[in-house]
Image (spheres, grey):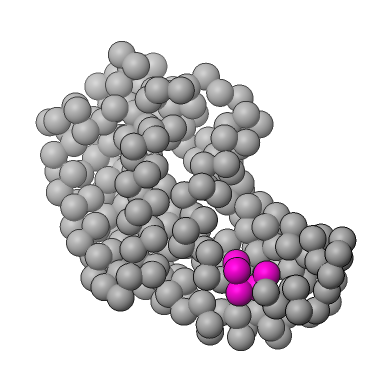
Amino acid sequence: MGVGPGTMGLTLPIFLVLWVIMMAAMMLPSVAPVALGWARAIRRRSSGLAQAGRIVQFLLGYLVVWAAFGALVFGLLALTDRWLGAAPEAGRWIGAGAFALAGAQQFGPLKRVCLRHCRSPFTQLLHYSGFGGPGRDFRVGAHHGGYCVGCCWGLMIVLIPLGVMNVAAMAGLAVLIFLEKLWRHGRALSYVAGAVFLVLAVLAPFQPWLLPGLSMQD
């Protein structure tokens, strides 16, 4: 698709389909410990179509949360389209703001809480074993998806200046997310990434090459 500004002319339904596919690909490595653990628990208690249905419910719950966040991102991109159309030079400040927001989020309390949750898959599975009632697996998926959004929303925001469908940026963020959640130095890495984003926020207004997703030339 290339790298373009704003929504790149996509409608909301098409954008959400692409966004959900993108999130599934980016988050799969880091969410695998919990997803596989819960799938094993499902297999121990059900079989056949019931087992498949429960696994699908879990996945749907996880992806619905990311789809809801994707709708918010689409709204931000639509505003970006409008701002760039009225004042193309505003892109440098939009980019700086996005990098600054991402950097601040890396140091914030929500990041710490959600990252601690995501870095403890065994604790999560014990917690989820207490869930009951109808829609249990959907709620487990949505609950875990909510923590993933809380942990990674700042990283997703940097796709506005870098390009929301920028494959290289997505691959880099996927590696960062994986290391943050599963590497033993992941918490320290999140602070390093936050510092880098804050530096980029300072540089962005003066370095247009840092903002491929806000260039009207694309």
Q: Quadrant of the C terminus?
A: top left
Query: For residue 81: magenta?
Result: no
Instruction: Tell me what residue is drawn at x 19 percent, y 28 percent.
Output: 209
Is residue 69 in view? no
Q: Which of these two is toward me, 88 or 184?
A: 184
Between 137 and 113, the one lying in front of the other is 137
Magenta-drawn stretch, dominant element (helix, strand or loop):
helix
Q: Considering only vertical position in the picture, is 43 above or below 141?
A: below
Question: Front-most of 58 and 102?
Answer: 58
Q: Residue at x 39, y 42 (%)?
A: 170
**Picture coordinates of residue 165, whole percent (x, y):** 44, 32
Residue that appears at 34% across and 28% down: 213
Q: Quadrant of residue 10?
A: top right
- Residue 37 falls within the magenta-colored stretch: yes
Q: Is residue 28 left or right of 138 when viewed as pictured?
A: left
Q: Position of residue 36 (x, y in %)?
A: 60, 69
Residue 51 shown left or right of residue 185 in the figure: right
- Estimate the x, y position of residue 120 in percent, counting from the top left: 46, 79
Using residue 70 as the reference point, say whether residue 61 is left or right of it.
right
Instruction: Spot the residue most to the front.
Output: 48
Q: Which residue is pictured at 52% across the width and 56% down the height?
A: 28
Q: How many marks?
A: 0
Residue range in magenta is 35-39
Residue 176 lies, with reference to residue 25, above or below; the image says: below
Q: Residue 119 falls in which quadrant of the image?
A: bottom left
Q: Is residue 142 left or right of residue 181?
A: right
Q: Nearer the viewer, residue 100 or 210?
A: 210
Give the quarter of the image for residue 53: bottom right
- State whether residue 190 appears in this view: yes
